[in-house]
Image (tube, grey):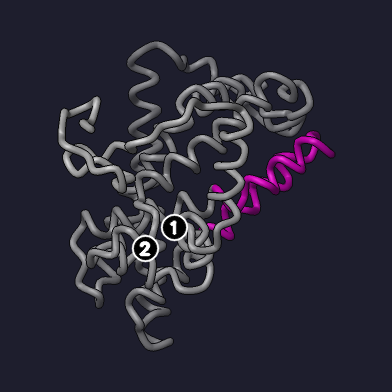
């Protein structure tokens, strides 16, 4: 018996080809098989997705440091975890644009001095949601590398850490966003915006677990980290606005008070 993919010799008791790793017996895909396989993988407590999700709640240092030190099978890799987060975020963006955009006031309300600017900015954020998501990585990773680095990670390793952090927070906040849209979309922004404060707290929690500073040392370093991250965020926004002005997306009239 030979493998159809690579012509390697197969014994009858082989489940996988030793040459290419393909299954020796492949049954045709059915919807029942797809659902069964999905449920088995989802409910399997030894599943790397479940293990990663649970670990990032309680012991994020075990997940992050474990992956960085070679435990690549125990935890889901950061790119795949990020893929899940971006998919769920895309679902929320699609639902808002397709069904709930009229229910959510992205102009800032009657008290906003620049409703035109707010509306245009919101459209840009929707269109480039994944890019904005990824651009947060250097804003969070660089200050951690410079200010909180008792663990001695390099910048690439801190980038991996914050891929896990942002992806996990996005996955956890997905049910909140979904339920809010389904039940009371008019209050979506009021519910969603405070979550950004929780993201900052979660970032600091992960950094504390990774570096094991004393409370006093961590407090001062956390302050420096937040100031540096805020500075990078302001630079990022200024850079985006300059780009949008230079391409004609924004005009000075967008900033005139109504």
Res 201 visible: no
> Seen in the image, is 175 located left or right of residue 11?
right
* Residue 85 as seen in the image, left or right of residue 91: left
Q: Taking 253 as reference, is 12 above or below it? A: below
> Which residue occupies the foreground of this view, 138 or 53?
53
| Residue shown at the point (61%, 46%) measured from the top left | 39
Is the N terminus in the top left, top right, bottom left or bottom right quadrant? top left
CA separation, marks 2 and 1? 6 Å
Of residues 12 and 15, the one nearer the viewer is: 12
Residue under numbered circle 2: 74
Q: Do residues under tags 2 and 1 come within 8 Å of each other at their CB atoms?
A: yes
**Residue, x 40% and y 27% (percent of image)?**
241
Can you see residue 251? yes
Task: Where is residue 9? Give x, y as percent.
Answer: 16, 37
Element type where label 1 sits in the image = helix
**Span of residues in magenta:** 171-199
Residue placed under numbered mark 1 in the picture: 48
Task: Measuring from the top left, give residue 92's x and y in whole percent.
Answer: 63, 33
N-term-proximal mark, 2 vs 1: 1
Residue 105 picture location, percent across and down: 73, 28
């Amino acid at each position: 018996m030979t493998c159809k993919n690579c012509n390697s010799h197969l014994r009858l008791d082989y489940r996988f080809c030793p040459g290419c790793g393909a299954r020796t017996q492949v049954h045709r895909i059915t919807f029942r098989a797809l659902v069964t396989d999905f449920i088995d993988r989802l409910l399997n407590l030894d599943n790397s997705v479940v293990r990663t999700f649970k670990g990032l709640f309680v012991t994020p240092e075990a997940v992050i440091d474990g992956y960085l030190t070679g435990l690549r099978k125990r935890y889901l890799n950061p790119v795949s975890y990020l893929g899940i987060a971006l998919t769920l975020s895309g679902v929320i963006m699609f639902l808002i644009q397709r069904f709930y955009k009229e229910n959510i006031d992205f102009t800032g309300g009657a008290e906003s001095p620049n409703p035109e600017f707010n509306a245009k900015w919101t459209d840009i954020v929707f269109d480039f949601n994944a890019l904005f998501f990824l651009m947060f990585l250097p804003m969070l990773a660089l200050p951690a590398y410079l200010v909180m680095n008792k663990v001695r990670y390099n910048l690439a390793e801190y980038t991996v850490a914050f891929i896990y952090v942002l992806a996990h927070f996005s996955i956890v906040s997905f049910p909140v966003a979904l339920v809010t849209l389904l039940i009371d979309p008019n209050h979506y922004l009021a519910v969603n915006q405070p979550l950004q404060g929780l993201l900052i707290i979660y970032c600091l929690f992960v950094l504390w677990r990774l570096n094991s500073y004393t409370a006093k040392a961590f407090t001062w370093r956390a302050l420096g980290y937040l100031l540096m991250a805020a500075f990078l965020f302001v630079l990022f926004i200024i850079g985006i606005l300059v780009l949008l002005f230079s391409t004609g997306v924004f005009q000075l009239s967008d900033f005139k008070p109504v």
